[in-house]
Amino acid sequence: MKRAVLLLSLLLIAIPVGAQNVNYYFHDTDSAVGKLMDSSHPTAGYPAYINLDEGAAIWSSSPFSSDTKISGDVSVTVFIEAFFLKPDAMPIQMRFIKVTLLDITPSGNMDPIAASKVTPIIFISNNTVKHPTIIINNVDYTIPQGDSLGIKIEKAINLMSYFPFSMLSPFFATYILYDSRDECSFAEIPINMTGGGISLECYDREESVKPGESVDYGIMIYNTGSSDDVVSFSHNYNGNEWKVEISPQSVNVKRGGFNYTTVTVTAPEDAEPGDYLNITITGVGSNGASSVWLNTSIAPYSYGVSVTAKDSEKTGEPGDKVNFTFNVKNTGDLTDTYSLGVTCVWDTHLSENNITLEPGKSKDVVVAVDIPLNASNGTVQLVVLTAKSMNDNTKESSARAQLTVIYTTPPAPESGGGINPGYILVVIGVIFLIVIAAYLSKISVKSIELYCDERMKEISPGRKAEFLIKLKNPMDRVKDGKNRIKYRIGIEGSIPERWTAKVDRDELILDGGEEAEIRLTVQPPSDASYDEWASVDLVVYPSKGKSERLNLLITLREPQPLLETSYEHEGEMEEGNKVITRVKIENEGDADADNVRVSILVNGKEKNRVEGIRIPAGGYVEVSIPWIAEEENDVEVRVEEIREE
């Protein structure tokens, strides 16, 4: 089989000493003054826009938790669109733009720090979008603790405000495009000049949760300063609906090293899908300060279902009707209706075919199974109940139970007032049969034992289901080979058309005490309906003794990945040491895994993760993930496929 190999390595980010420029991206999120700007790169596919002809555009950072010095050139890259109703009729347009750096106080006062020169921008013909970089030279200023940094962009010269050009102003506009992957307007600010620097990183800054649930963000703190540092953390959320906790609130970071803290965000119980919280986490030490932006949104409502068997095993006699109770639970967020179906070789009756449940509610469903009158003693059949969402056909669940046929001896009739001659004959006949049975038990021994660890398989159309059945000769081994038995192997049961079922051998010979494996392979056609299923009986006929059969069940499902994981650690697990966990994930399923997340948890807390991994069916990936050891290290490697709802 051709295997696709993908090698991913997540290396520690090295922040060089003296790296002081920080990018502040412009976002379409309201701030205390204007819109928010922070260090998180935009992820939207389409830009937001502001019309400069209606007034200046202002972005502001979160308040600084300590005095922050700016020293050097500030550069602002901005996407500008010159709009005209008939661009073909206007071969050239010109705009004059000015950028001002602001110190914004907690009361909202805006004090200019420095400004750029007026920058003319020429737009030729239909090339109406430009992204110039405008420089504010030689800034030397300290932002006081509690103040915010602001950027103001405005038109410096507006010819359309003067007559007679004002008559044409309704046909022109000047737009700032921002907050998208392609149009990511931003400012590059030289901060943390003195003492090296502190940098915060978070590998996944956007998460979604359900109302009332929490999510943890792992924050890594790098110290590129000249000395060891103690870094304290704070956040800018002042509301009372969401809950934000930082633990620990301060950490020791060795010079040239790094450490961790965890930010836990809890959503309100009454939150709705689409609600979100943007917060900025700030870390401050003697070597500098840094911040990171986090976004927590409320996940959309989803459907879900779970089926469990209350009666996992039951017995019955031929002709009996045996009832099995299953529980169906709505594990989703919305009221849902489920269609119910039963898979069993024998006739079955459902107490109801569809049920409707509210979120979190469950209901018992009874499946009645009719045991045929000709059922053999010891026959085992599987009973499978499947519940499928009628609103989302990807949500379904199944549970199975086992029914075994067992004969029981009827009780003797009660005697009346005298001895019935017929009853005496019955007793004599029973005694005779007991004697015959005792004699036969002496001259005959069970000659077959059949075992199979997994008697039910669920596969996708076109795939093969393989069963390994162990056949043993339970008789004692004797020198003359009298207990050597020849076994013929056959296949019976309920098998749909175009399905194939075959064994790897038709017969074998076993001496007393010997055993062998039989491989049974069942394969449906690639275009088989998901409603089809097969009940296959492996029948073994010995050269002496009674034949035995083993029932196997095969049902169909949609293709899906199957991830198998192995890993090893490199480095000493001593407190403060760097450990690298190398994880190998193999996809042994029949569908690609498109969005796999690998997380390292130590003592129940997430230390690091990698996301967005794609593993083709039959392929594998290798991931190297670094983390810092603690005093005690109970390590868990969690691999999961993240499915979009």
Image (cartoon, rainbow, N blue to C red):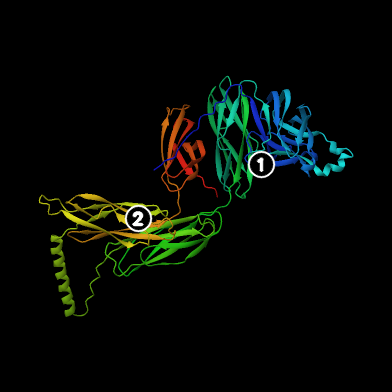
Query: Which of the pair 162/584 is nearer the observer?
Result: 162
Where residue 481 appears, x then y in whole percent? 12, 52
Q: Amino acid at mark 1?
A: Gly
Q: Which mark is residue 522?
A: 2
Res 108 visible: no
Secondary structure beneath disc 1? Answer: loop
Residue to which mark 1 is pinned:
239
Image vertical order of residue 269 relative to residue 123, above or below:
below
Marks 2,1: beta carbons within 8 A: no
Residue 134 visible to an observer of this rendering: yes
Amino acid of disc 2: Val
Residue 187 horizontal side relative to residue 358, left or right: right
Name above or below for residue 620 compared with residue 290. below
Residue at the (84%, 38%) spot, across then down: 160
Location of residue 239 by image quarter: top right
Disc 1 residue crowd, few under 14, some 14–19, many 20+, Cα 10 Å: few
